[in-house]
Every structure is written in structure tokens, then in C-alpha cells.
Amino acid sequence: MNRRSFARKALALPLLPAAGPVIAGFPPTRIKPKRLSPGDTIGLITPGSYIADESLQRAVDNLLKLGLKVKMGRHIRAKHGFVAGTDQQRLDDLHTMFEDKSVDAIWCARGGYGCTRLLPHIDYSLIRANPKVLVGYSDITALHQAIFQMTGLVTFHGPVGASELTPYTEAQLRAVLMQPEAPYTIPPSLENEASQEEGFYAETYQKGKVEGHLLGGNLSLLAAMAGTPYLPDVEGAIVFVEDIGEPPYRLDRMLTQLRQSWPLGKAAGLALGIFADCEMKPGSDSLPLQQTLAEQIRPLQIPSAYGLPFGHISHQCTFPIGIRAAFDAGRRTITLLETAVS
């Protein structure tokens, strides 16, 4: 995701003191947040990268379109280099929105580098005492994994506020957050299946049907979190991964790291979304994307497939972190076996 330049800029940011001791292990008892309803107030924050005015306006318009009200984070227009304000400002907005009784749910206006810097300083006890829907994807993966690991709160890997709310994306969002049913099989996106863009293809590496709790998100973030206490135990989980803008050799490196340190081979199954803009470039010695992924995934010998409807794409589904699900690798479908909201 071309994060190297972002990381160099972030080195100059002031570090916060740790919030307290971190205890590794499986998450506490799961907590399901209250479902969203028309008229609910959404706290809009930018815990990672700075958001441009046009994108922020689109985020507000999207929430209003869903019949929701918007409450801006105090520091949502802050800027500190590439990220959306200092660590303390972004952390304050996250904590304030969880603590604010007038806020029903929290939506990340965009992703982008910066979320991993907050993990040691988050007040997880405050979040556990004030459970709410939290939505976002890409670098928001760091918040999803850490919050589920440390509190048991189910959060939602779905569109950021500034995403394009296509009919498919909106329908899947509503199906999980506003009108939940169980079991619910996430339907394919016909637009994705018809796309001729690079990265839009379907492949099953190993057929099989498995059940487990959903974990995952952006591959770059999962690899960056490997070895930290913020990544939940992968054993028995259905892991979903995606990425954007990474050449195949970097994907190979990150998958190698996860196989050795998480490790992916103990997962129940592995579902890959659309890896947008990840094909090898002309003149590169890299293997093609499709071959790179197949050589990494097939040796795991677990049900696994590529091409599910999520990633940095217009037509994407919403995955609840920590909810039990069934994965049919042959059909490339995920079925939610329980509702994710109360």
C-alpha cells in the first residue's frame, strides 16, 4: 500500500505513554454492540491518515443517505504530517466517541497509516464499558483486531465513510448492521464477477467447508501486527485478507511472515478478497499475482479461495470480526451463522 514513505514521516511524531499493561491471549467474552437504526447518531473520526475536504463531505453525505445523523470528531480536521492530527488528538477522538452517550456508533471516515501507533495507548476498559458499532477497513484493520482481542467487542470490516456506497455495498452494510438475520450467506457481487480489471478473478486453492470465527482485514496490517499482543489467536478462525498497490513479491513476503509467525496454517480456512492494483508491472521479474498467491496458499492445505467480494473495491461486503461463520471454499461463500448486533 506504498506505506514506506508514510512510515518515514511518522517517525517524527510524538509518542504517547502506554495506557497500561497488555495481556495476550484469546479475547474476553464477546460483546455484540447495539444494531444501527435510522436516526442514530454516528461519531465520525479519522484515526489514521488525514482526510481531504471532498472526501469528508462524501463521508457525511453517505451517512445522511443511510438515514443517520453525524457528529464530527473534535480533531477530524487536524493534520500532523501525513496523519490526521497527533497521536493524542486521534486517540482523544476515539475515546470521546466511545464515551459520549449521545453517539450510537463510530465510523472511520477513511483509513490510511496511523492506527497501529495508537494500539498501546487505547483505554480498552473504556471501550468494554461502552460497546458500540465501529466500522472501517484498510488500516482500520489494526483497530478491529486489537479491540476484539482486548475487549471481545465485535467490530465491522466494512466501507469507510468516504467509500462509494454502491447498491451492493449499501445492501450488505444494512444486512449486517441494521436488518440482521442468521444464517445469512453473503451474496456475490455481479459487478465484481463481470469486471475485466486486473485482480478481478476467482480461484479455489483447496475445496472444503469449515466453520469458525471471522478474523482478518488488510494483509499489510496483519503482517505488521504479527508478534504483537494485539493480534487474536488464528487457530480455528476463518481468516479473510486483501490488499492494494503491493507488487507480488511484497505480498509473498507478507504471507511468508504470517505463515511463520501467526501462523496461517492453523486457521480453519482462508478467504482472499480482491487484491486491487497488485499485478506485476511490465519489465518486473516478479511472478504474476495469481501464481504468487497460489504458491503461498496451496501449501497451507486448508480450505481457501480467492475473489470474494471485499477489498479496496467499489462493491464490497461487511464482515463482523469475531462472529461465527461458515466458509465454503468451493463456492467461495461465507455464511454468517449468528447476528453480529443485539
Image (tube, rainbow, N blue to C red):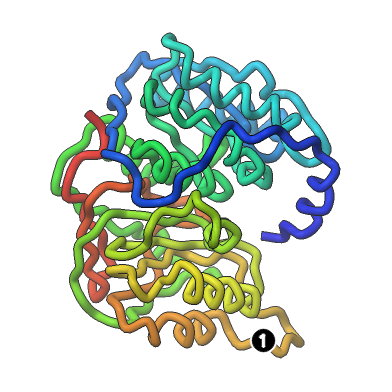
Q: Residue 249 occupies which quadrant of the picture?
A: bottom right
Front position in the image: 11 or 315: 11
* Above or below for 218 versus 157: below
Front position in the image: 179 or 45: 45
Quarter of the image with the C terminus is top left
Q: Quick one: which residue is furthest to the front in this view?
A: 21
* Above or below for 147 versus 290: above
Q: Where is residue 4? Give x, y as percent.
A: 77, 59
Quarter of the image with the N terminus is bottom right
Q: Where is residue 129? Give x, y as percent.
A: 37, 22
Image mark count: 1
Q: Where is residue 188? Give x, y as percent.
A: 30, 59
Kindly identify the amino acid type of the residue bearing the numbered disc 1: Ser
Q: Where is residue 72? Give x, y as percent.
A: 59, 18
Q: Is residue 77 left or right of residue 91?
A: right
Crowding at dot 1, Cα within 10 Å, few <14 / some 14-19 / many 20+, comes out as some
Query: Residue at point 43% right, 63% down?
Result: 273
- Identify residue for label 1: 286
Query: Residue at point 53% right, 66% down?
Result: 275
Q: Is residue 160 left or right of residue 204?
A: right
* Above or below for 273 versus 139: below
Query: Residue at point 75% right, 25% down?
Result: 78
Q: Secondary structure at mark 1?
A: loop
Query: Residue at point 42% right, 10% down?
Result: 101
